[in-house]
Image (tube, rainbow, N blue to C red):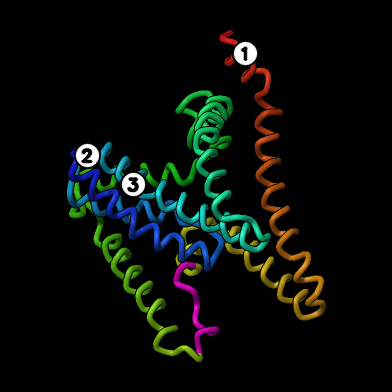
Amino acid sequence: MPYWQSTLAVILSFFLALVACRITGETDTTPIGAMGKVTQLTFGVLNPGNINVNLMSANITASAAASSADLLTDLKSGYLLGANPRKQFIAQFAGIFVGTLVTVFAFAALVPNASVLGSEQFPAPAAQTWAAVAKALSKGLEALEPVKVWSIIIGGALGIVLSVLPMAFPKQQKYLPSAAAFGLAWVFDWYYSLLFLIGAIIAEVLQKKSPKNAEEFTFPVASGIIAGGSLMGVILIFWENGPEMIKRFLGH
């Protein structure tokens, strides 16, 4: 990437990181993909036809946004538990080096080669979306179909309206939908939104019937379900491909 474009991507990262932090605070979900798409659209205009620049600029922005939002989540958890923010920061800083090694080796162990990405075993929906946007913008915005351009304009306008309405009508704020949550519902697969709805209804019923139990159990149970599902997915991959992974690491 040209230096000036790298600098612009870093500057964009600052503002989009603020957006990501706010959305994470509201929904507990960091929109890494959405942050990357904003940069992809920007560089689709500035440097049309260059897929490498399009992807790398989005990677700079999305990585910064994700790290910022995750750090805030950790600091909030530490605040609730009475942890020392300075020591938390030191631990985070040390984790950068350990995390880099672990993620590289874990990815190498789980993913045999790039051709399996996008398959049933490794669907990688976020990566496929980034690739699709980069290809679509390879000829600039003028190559996009009118319906896609209008979708971007309408989505952006709706996001602005939903963000301004709570400030204009503070008393009705609880009845107005969150722009972040509304947007994420379009990004996720339909069954994620359905599961969110079911979980919210169960939590609301429990809150009304037994507020004390709701306060104690809602978040731990929900976190356990999410973590358990993720861990089981990794276990199944190792169960199905364990011998092949061992052979690959041993060089056989």
Residue at the image point whose x is 50% and y is 38% from the top: 96
Task: Give the secondary structure at mark 1.
Answer: helix
Q: Callout 3: 10 Å neighbours few (<14), some, many (20+)?
A: many
Q: Residue at x 52, y 65 (%)?
A: 25
Residue 235 higher or lower than 73, as above or below: above
Q: Which region of the structure is painted magenta?
A: 172-180
Q: Nearer the viewer, mark 2 or mark 3?
A: 3
Which residue corresponds to mark 2?
A: 50
Q: Which residue is mark 3?
A: 58
The local crowd at label 2, few if under 14, some if 14 to 19, many if 20 or more residues have their Cα within 10 Å, is some
Callout 2 amino acid: Asn
Disc 1 designates what residue? Answer: 247
- Indicate whether residue 175 is drawn in magenta: yes
Q: Assess whether mark 1 and mark 2 are in contact (beta carbons under 8 angstroms).
A: no
Residue 34 covered by magenta stretch: no
Residue 90 location (% of width, % of height): 53, 45
Front: mark 1 or 3: 3
Residue 225 x/y as whole percent: 72, 53
Q: Between marks 2 and 3, how big is the CA–CA gap?
A: 13 Å
- Dot 2 or dot 1, earlier in sequence: 2
Q: Position of residue 94 (x, y in %)?
A: 53, 38
Name which residue lies at 19% across and 49% down. 140
